[in-house]
Image: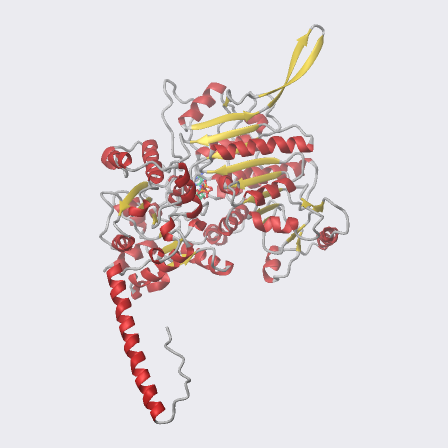
């Protein structure tokens, strides 16, 4: 099998092949950068666009430089900086163009052409009603049944961030250094709103002081930048206004569901805060933050605060130092904290039982992958942190590619009850949605493959690993790719099964790895590093990597086991085809056991293809199949989401093996026969020994 040749393509890309457009390889998402990361730009009917969407700071070449997708994110991004001279190290400041605002009609047209829908979910209005000579104030809430559409100024180019929204020069430079050409849809819609609501929503009254935001946008569409840039800029602006220079204070928290995602966001944050003096820190176990205690009794957090102040004065805290020293320390140099819910909650609830730590300095709370953070699995932990952020000016934003209406309701209710309990006016709540439906991944190829048995899946996967394989007429599934399984055991077992499929001369078993939550932190980090560096080509995992993790070079995703929900499918599949790149493929295997549940996946595929305008033979799921598959009942959906397909949780069927049931039975019988014969032989020997007077009854049976 010439797998070496195939797998080598992942790392040894010639400039020619990686830029060529025609071949299958040329179409792989890892074969080049995408200059336009936008998914939608429908024609504006009846109107000619007045403004050109081209980036004014067109200093970036038309064809972006070759990027090593596999290089670790931080290294890849910092490498060129080292090579350049100090003077030219920073990207040139984006050209500042004169601030021009679009008319409300133009905004609406442009937003619609990018399938961006912005809705006001809640607003407290004060109306002045003239009653004879007296003016009476009345509070009117936006009625649930008539939520108005908003038309905020869309961000057409990153240059506008400086000219129109007065973004800090440093942050603009750092952003420009990332080499992005044009904003994605979610950046287009959300950044103006979050950076300068007074400008973006100048037509709307009562929103100028900022809004809370629910943002729903496809996987890989640049949501991280969308919340980090405004957060950094807002901290800098506040400090500049208050003339607070050179201080560190925890002002923003980003909550994410996994450690991998937290590290990734810390890396992106560090790129964006270069030269600003701000610190982006990832929460670690045992880390102590400068927090206040609600009950000033005999609580240890007083001590912690004192310690925090002392260490602030000493000014000796440094992230690198902390890495070296595993002992818990008060981390006073942190402006933006990235954390998983439990790590921060553990800190907030540690210490004396009758005290609760609060974080009154936090002005921005960001929930990335908000639907999962507010799912029963993490809900209590997330809400615990939310409650601890006691600043009355707290701004909240919620981000995900999928957001059920239950999440929207929960957020709305929580915001209302928070305002009531703190006796403060509730901030307006705005929802921003990119695309027609959140259950879609429109820019990749989807395939559903039926195999008669569990063993058939393994054979099919082996088949896909072959150099000549392709799925229907679609693009081939080429390494590097991610394989999703239902449980940790299955991930490990699949790795065991596949590790000898990669020839030694191609790196052998070191090219394949399994990453799951059962591994220690260091092992997880090492696997991530190797996968990013292109040393691991097939990464088998569980849903722990389904959310948020950004591997620009991943060609495909294979759902070895059917995902537990439509949202899980969207997020798993969304690990490929990121930043608008086309050519990514998501393959989903299903067996007889999955048939009652597979319609959830088929529906997402159908919706994705509808949004991408694919029909007929191009479609990965044909109409006859959609019609034939049974609808998934509410109970089944719930069960599947919570537990996955039952038969894969335990017992023989949960095993992954290339041997058929018949072969396994035969092997079992053969083993039994050998053991039986050994036992008989030993019994005879024993009897003989006894006869010789040596038997002392020490024999303890056969080993397994
Ligand atoms: N304007 C842009 N142009 C090109 N690439 C971009 C742009 N903005 C972000 N990216 C790149 O897109 C990739 C995906 O971004 P990000 O991880 O923020 O996506 P996301 O929307 O958070 O995805 P997910 O829903 O999976 O978490 C990153 O590699 C990022 O560097």
Residue 669 visible here: yes
- Viewer-side residue, 200 vs 139: 139
Quadrant position of the C terminus in the picture: bottom left
Residue 20 visible here: no
- Viewer-side residue, 125 vs 411: 411
Q: Which residue lies furthest to the bottom in this view?
A: 692
Residue 256 on image: x %, y %:
52, 45
At horizontal 70% and vertical 38% (from top left) the residue drawn is: 243
Identify the image quadrant of residue 23: top left
At horizontal 26% and vertical 32% (from top left) the residue drawn is: 615
Residue 481 on image: x %, y %:
35, 51
Residue 506 on image: x %, y %:
31, 62
Quadrant position of the N terminus in the picture: bottom left
Figure colour scheme: secondary structure
Residue 221 on image: x %, y %:
43, 38
At horizontal 23% and vertical 51% (from top left) the residue drawn is: 469
Ligand 1 quarter of the rendering: top left
Residue 681 versus residue 85 in the image, above or below: below
Q: Residue furthest top?
A: 132
Identify the image quadrant of residue 578: top left
Residue 15 versus residue 427 in the image, above or below: below
Identify the image quadrant of residue 272: top right
- Viewer-side residue, 430 vs 552: 430
Q: Which residue lies furthest to the right in this view?
A: 297
- Viewer-side residue, 467 vs 275: 467
Report the label total. 0
């Amino acid at each position: 099998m010439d797998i070496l040749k195939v797998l080598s393509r992942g790392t040894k890309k010639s400039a020619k092949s990686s830029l060529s457009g025609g071949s299958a390889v040329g179409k792989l998402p890892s074969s080049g950068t995408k200059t336009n990361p936008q998914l939608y730009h429908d024609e504006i009917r009846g109107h000619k666009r007045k403004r050109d969407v081209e980036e004014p700071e067109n200093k970036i070449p038309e064809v972006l430089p070759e990027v090593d997708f596999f290089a670790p994110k931080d290294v890849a991004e910092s490498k060129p900086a080292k090579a350049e001279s100090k003077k030219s190290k920073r990207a040139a400041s984006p050209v500042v163009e004169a601030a021009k605002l679009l008319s409300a009609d133009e905004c609406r047209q442009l937003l619609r052409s990018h399938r961006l829908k912005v809705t006001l979910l809640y607003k407290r209005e004060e109306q002045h009603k003239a009653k004879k000579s007296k003016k009476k104030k009345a509070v009117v809430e936006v009625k649930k049944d008539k939520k108005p559409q908003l038309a905020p100024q869309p961000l057409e180019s990153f240059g506008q961030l400086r000219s129109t929204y007065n973004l800090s020069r440093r942050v603009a430079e750092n952003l420009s250094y990332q080499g992005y050409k044009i904003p994605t849809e979610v950046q287009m819609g959300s950044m103006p709103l979050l950076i300068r609501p007074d400008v973006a929503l100048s037509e709307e009254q009562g929103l100028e002081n900022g809004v809370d935001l629910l943002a729903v946008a496809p996987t890989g569409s640049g949501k991280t930048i969308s919340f980090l840039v405004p957060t950094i800029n807002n901290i800098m602006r506040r400090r500049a206004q208050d003339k607070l220079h050179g201080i560190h204070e925890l002002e923003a928290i980003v909550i994410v569901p996994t450690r991998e995602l937290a590290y990734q966001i810390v890396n992106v944050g560090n790129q964006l805060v270069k030269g600003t003096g701000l610190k982006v820190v990832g929460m670690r176990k045992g880390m102590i933050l400068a927090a206040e205690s609600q009950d000033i009794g005999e609580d240890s957090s007083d001590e912690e605060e004192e310690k925090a102040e002392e260490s602030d004065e000493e000014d000796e805290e440094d992230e690198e130092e902390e890495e070296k020293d595993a002992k818990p320390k008060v981390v006073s140099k942190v402006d933006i904290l990235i954390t998983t819910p439990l790590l921060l909650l553990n800190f907030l609830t540690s210490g004396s039982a009758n005290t609760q730590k609060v974080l009154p300095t936090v002005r921005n709370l960001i929930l990335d992958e908000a639907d999962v953070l507010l799912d029963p699995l993490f809900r209590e932990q997330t809400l615990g942190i939310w409650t601890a952020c006691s600043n009355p000016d707290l701004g909240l934003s919620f981000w995900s590619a999928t957001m059920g209406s239950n999440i929207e309701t929960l957020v709305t209710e929580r915001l209302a009850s928070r305002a009531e309990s703190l006796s403060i006016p509730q901030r307006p709540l705005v929802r921003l949605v990119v695309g027609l439906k959140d259950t879609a991944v429109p820019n990749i190829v989807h395939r559903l493959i039926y195999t008669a048995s569990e063993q058939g899946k393994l054979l099919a996967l082996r088949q896909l690993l072959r150099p000549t394989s392709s799925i229907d007429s679609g693009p081939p599934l080429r390494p590097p790719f991610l394989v999703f399984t239902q449980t940790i055991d299955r991930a490990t077992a699949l790795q065991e099964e596949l590790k000898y499929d990669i020839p030694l001369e191609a790196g052998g078993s070191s090219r394949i790895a399994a990453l799951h939550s059962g591994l220690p932190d260091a092992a997880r980090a090492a696997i991530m590093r190797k996968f990013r560096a292109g040393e691991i080509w097939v990464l088998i995992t569980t849903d722990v990597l389904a959310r948020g993790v950004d591997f620009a070079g991943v060609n495909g995703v294979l759902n070895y086991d059917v995902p537990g929900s439509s949202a899980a499918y969207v997020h798993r599949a969304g690990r490929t085809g990121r930043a608008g790149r086309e050519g990514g493929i998501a393959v989903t295997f299903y067996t007889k056991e999955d048939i009652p549940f597979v319609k959830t996946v088929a529906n997402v595929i159908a919706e994705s293809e509808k949004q991408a305008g694919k029909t007929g033979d191009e479609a990965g799921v044909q109409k006859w199949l959609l019609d034939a598959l049974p609808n998934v009942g509410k109970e089944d959906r719930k069960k599947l989401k919570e537990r996955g397909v039952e038969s894969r949780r335990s017992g023989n069927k949960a095993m992954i093996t290339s041997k058929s049931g018949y072969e396994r039975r035969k092997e079992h019988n053969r083993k039994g026969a050998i053991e039986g014969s050994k036992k008989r032989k030993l019994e005879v020997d024993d009897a003989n020994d006894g006869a010789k007077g040596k038997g002392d009854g020490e024999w303890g049976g056969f080993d397994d």
